[in-house]
Image (cartoon, rainbow, N blue to C red):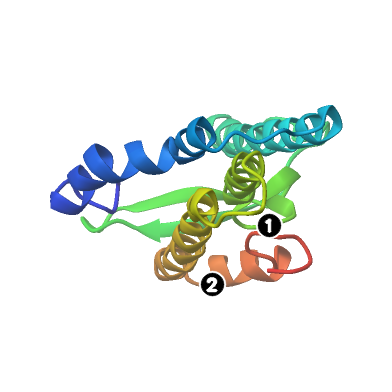
Amino acid sequence: MCHDHFGFYFSWGIAAWLPVMYTLQTQYLATHPIDLSSWTAALILTTGVSGYVLFRAANHQKYISRATNGDCKIWGKPPQFIRAKYKTAEGSMHESLLLCSGWWGLVRHANYLGDLILSYSMCASCGFTNLLPWTYAIYMTILLVHRCYRDEVRCHNKYGDSWKEYCAKVPYRIIPGIF
């Protein structure tokens, strides 16, 4: 919302698109019930909860490191970070911490990874015989990869050389070792 201002795109998305997309798997299963083995259901549930926990933990790590100005512990150790200075539109100088520890030391958008794991788990609960319930995971993948690139351009413009240093320390965007 900070960069995407309120307007038709935003209001239509909240009023029409999201209610359909966020309930698509439930709607599908109501009309096309499937039987999952207990092990399959447990695996999907565990994977989905793990994605949610990753999403929340990653956001918490970033929050706590910034709220304490880096005087905290991430995974039991003092965090590594880059102090990135930037100039606001009004011309005043500010500083942000670019966290290089915990989940943020593995990928630059750890919260997106958690979101994707949860999305794919929700779709997996519908089985693999129909593409319709998988449109949510496809949509989330496109949305978050696009947002990743957009955020990185914005961060490069905002932080300059500090962002380049961060990218060198944390080379992967969303999936460790792959992307």
**Residue 1 in picture, x, y percent from top left:** 29, 45
Q: Can residue 1 be seen from the camera position used here?
A: no
Instruction: Say which residue appears at 48% left-offset and 63% top-offset.
Output: 142
Which residue is nearer to you in this view: 111 or 10? 10
Identity, as a three-letter code, of the amino acid under mark 2: Asp
Up/down of 44 relative to 106, above or below: above
Q: Where residue 32 sits: x, y (%)?
A: 55, 38
| Residue 19 image-quadrant placement | top left
Q: Residue at x 71, y 46 (%)?
A: 103
Amino acid type, residue under disc 1 in the picture: Val
For this orientation, the residue located farthest to the left is 8
Q: Residues within 10 Å of mark 2 (few under 14, many from 20)?
A: few
The residue beneath circle 2 is: 161
Residue 9: assigned label: none
Q: Is residue 41 visible?
A: yes
Taking the image as shown, residue 141 lies to the left or right of residue 104, namely left
Quarter occupied by the C terminus: bottom right
Residue bearing the label numbered 1: 107
Task: Tell me the element at label 1.
Answer: loop
Q: CA distance from mark 2 to mark 1?
A: 18 Å
Residue 38 is left or right of residue 131, and the answer is: right
Structural crowding at the residue carrying mark 1, measured as other residues with C-alpha within 10 Å and reported as few (<14), some (14–19) or many (≥20): many
Secondary structure of residue under mark 2: helix
Disc 2, disc 1: CB below 8 Å?
Answer: no
At a point 70% along the width and 60% down the height, the residue shown is: 175
Which picture quadrant has residue 111? top right
Give the residue drawn at x 49%, y 53%: 132
Q: At which x and y percent is residue 145?
A: 51, 64
Q: Nearer the viewer, mark 2 or mark 1?
A: 1
